[in-house]
């Protein structure tokens, strides 16, 4: 199968770098799967799970709290605000993030900023629900 | 001529100091390794961010450009964000950053511009408060943060952006020390508002699809880029501080060693002189009998 280079970078470190077959990316306008040869694209991400396949049977999952994805001719780069291995994520981590977002929304004065934070908060809460269901299943 | 007891005390005190500087050097070396790793780990993100931003900004021009790129259209009020350490005893680290900021502030003032200073780290404030007491608008304390992370950078960026939105300044520059090696740290000034887009890196070869709109992406990306720059300044600074402290403490330890050697020599010499003198006294006393 055709592969392409994928990098998941957070401000603190590089979480993944290597050849992959496909990556599912949580864009603000819906999840999408990137395969080799995808058209160049820049997309903003919402909190969610990045799911990648290194071959037909092996995959990895990461949690990102937002960021951007850039696809160009030969590679996909995700610049995440925060990224973790899915094993390191639990409900208390998500709750913590929701609380942080809430306090920031309360402290913000800028209107555009408020709108953005409110949106982020909705997305975070949504993802928390999804994550809960996933755990239960 | 100091008495033997004086000399002994002096040697003991230098030895105690040497122990302290030695310990500080080792602590700095251990911390340096971590700080250096953090600084290096943050580089790829900043580099990629710069690339994406250059690509995006290349496609946007004229009036549609956000104010973070185009600026406010004037350059009357400058904000200088000075990153320094919270502690001293690290060689010329703090003072070289402060000096760079001071020169810049004076040059701007000579041109009739208004200068505002935001100090991140106590030492910068200490160094600048004598000259620019009235220009310093805030001091951000770094002491509570054990390990600087994205959240700290975000808080500082938020602070800067709020001021920018309120129209408190037109141009912002950050001052920090770039970590080159243990013995070399370069104090650096970098303009962050309006953003400096590296020229020549913008490639037009690929036409990107944008999701959502180009302008919207830029709007979320620019503040984040600012955070990344601030984070980079913080991390580079942390590594530089430890590097500077390590080499400063290394030479302090060496100097203390030399001092001990010298003092011990003086001590031994005067001890021997005293013994010789006593012997002469005894012998000449015996001869006189």
Image: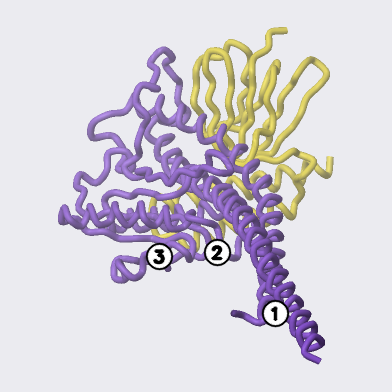
Chain colours: A yellow, B purple
Distance between the Cα atoms at labels 1 and 3? 41 Å
| Of marks 1 and 3, the one in the foreground | 1
Of residues B97 and B216, the one drawn nearer to the viewer in this rendering: B97
| Of marks 1 and 2, the one in the foreground | 1
When the figure is inspected, residue B23 is found, relative to residue A11, above or below; the finding is: below
Mark 3 chain: B
Distance between the Cα atoms at labels 1 and 2? 37 Å
Q: Residue furthest left?
A: B112
Q: Residue at x 55, y 48 (%)?
A: B240
- How packed mark 1 is, by other alpha carbons closer than 10 Å (few <14, some 14-19, many 20 or more), is some
Circle 3 SS class: helix
Of residues A131 and A3, the one drawn nearer to the viewer in this rendering: A3
Circle 2 SS class: loop
Of residues A121 and B189, the one drawn nearer to the viewer in this rendering: B189
Does residue B170 appear to the left or right of A90 in the view shown?
left
Residue under pointer 2: B87
**Is any atom of residue B184 visible in this view?**
yes
| Pointer 1 or 2: first along the chain | 1
Does residue B213 appear to the left or right of B12 in the view shown?
left
Do the residues under discs 2 and 3 have CB atoms within 8 angstroms?
Answer: no
Mark 2 chain: B
Mark 1 chain: B
Q: Residue furthest bottom?
A: B289
Q: Residue at x 70, y 41 (%)?
A: A84
Q: Which disc is residue B127 wearing?
A: 3
Q: Which disc is residue B4 wearing?
A: 1
Distance between the Cα atoms at labels 2 and 3? 12 Å
The image shows residue A11 at horizontal and vertical percentages of 58, 40
- How packed mark 2 is, by other alpha carbons closer than 10 Å (few <14, some 14-19, many 20 or more), is few
């Amino acid at each position: 199968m055709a592969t392409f280079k994928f990098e998941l970078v957070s401000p603190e470190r590089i979480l993944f770098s290597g050849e992959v077959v496909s990556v599912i990316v949580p864009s603000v306008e819906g999840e999408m799967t990137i395969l080799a040869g995808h058209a160049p694209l820049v997309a903003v991400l919402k909190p969610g799970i990045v799911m990648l396949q290194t071959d037909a049977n092996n995959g990895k999952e990461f949690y990102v709290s937002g960021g951007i994805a850039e696809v160009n001719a030969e590679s996909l780069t995700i610049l995440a605000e925060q990224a973790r291995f899915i094993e390191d994520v639990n409900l208390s981590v998500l709750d913590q993030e929701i609380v942080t977002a809430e306090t920031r929304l309360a402290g913000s004065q800028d209107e555009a900023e408020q709108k953005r934070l409110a949106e982020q908060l909705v997305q975070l809460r949504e993802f928390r629900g999804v994550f809960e269901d996933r755990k239960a299943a | 001529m100091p008495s033997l007891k004086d000399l002994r005390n002096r040697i003991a005190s230098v030895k105690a100091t040497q122990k302290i500087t030695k310990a500080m050097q080792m602590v700095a070396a251990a911390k340096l390794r971590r700080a250096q790793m953090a600084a290096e780990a943050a580089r790829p993100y900043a580099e990629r961010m710069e690339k994406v931003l250059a690509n995006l900004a290349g496609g946007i021009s004229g009036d549609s450009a956000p104010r973070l790129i185009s600026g406010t259209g004037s350059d009357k009020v400058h904000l200088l964000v000075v990153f320094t350490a919270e502690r001293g005893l690290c060689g010329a680290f703090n003072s070289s950053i402060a000096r760079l900021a001071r020169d810049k502030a004076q040059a701007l003032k000579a041109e009739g511009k208004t200068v505002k200073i935001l100090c991140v780290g106590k030492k910068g404030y200490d160094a600048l408060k004598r000259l620019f007491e009235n220009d310093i608008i805030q001091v951000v304390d770094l002491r509570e943060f054990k390990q600087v992370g994205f959240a700290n950078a975000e808080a500082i960026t938020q602070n800067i952006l709020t001021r920018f939105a309120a129209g408190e300044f037109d141009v912002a520059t950050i001052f920090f020390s770039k970590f080159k090696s243990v013995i070399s740290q370069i104090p650096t000034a970098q303009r962050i508002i309006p953003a400096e887009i590296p020229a020549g890196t913008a490639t037009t070869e690929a036409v990107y699809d944008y999701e959502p709109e180009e302008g919207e992406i830029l709007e979320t990306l620019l503040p984040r880029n600012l955070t990344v720059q601030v984070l980079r300044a913080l991390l580079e600074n942390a590594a530089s501080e430890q590097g500077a402290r390590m080499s400063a403490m290394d030479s302090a330890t060496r100097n203390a060693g030399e001092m001990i050697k010298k003092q011990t020599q003086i001590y031994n010499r005067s001890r021997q002189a005293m013994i010789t003198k006593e012997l002469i006294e005894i012998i000449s006393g015996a001869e006189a009998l």
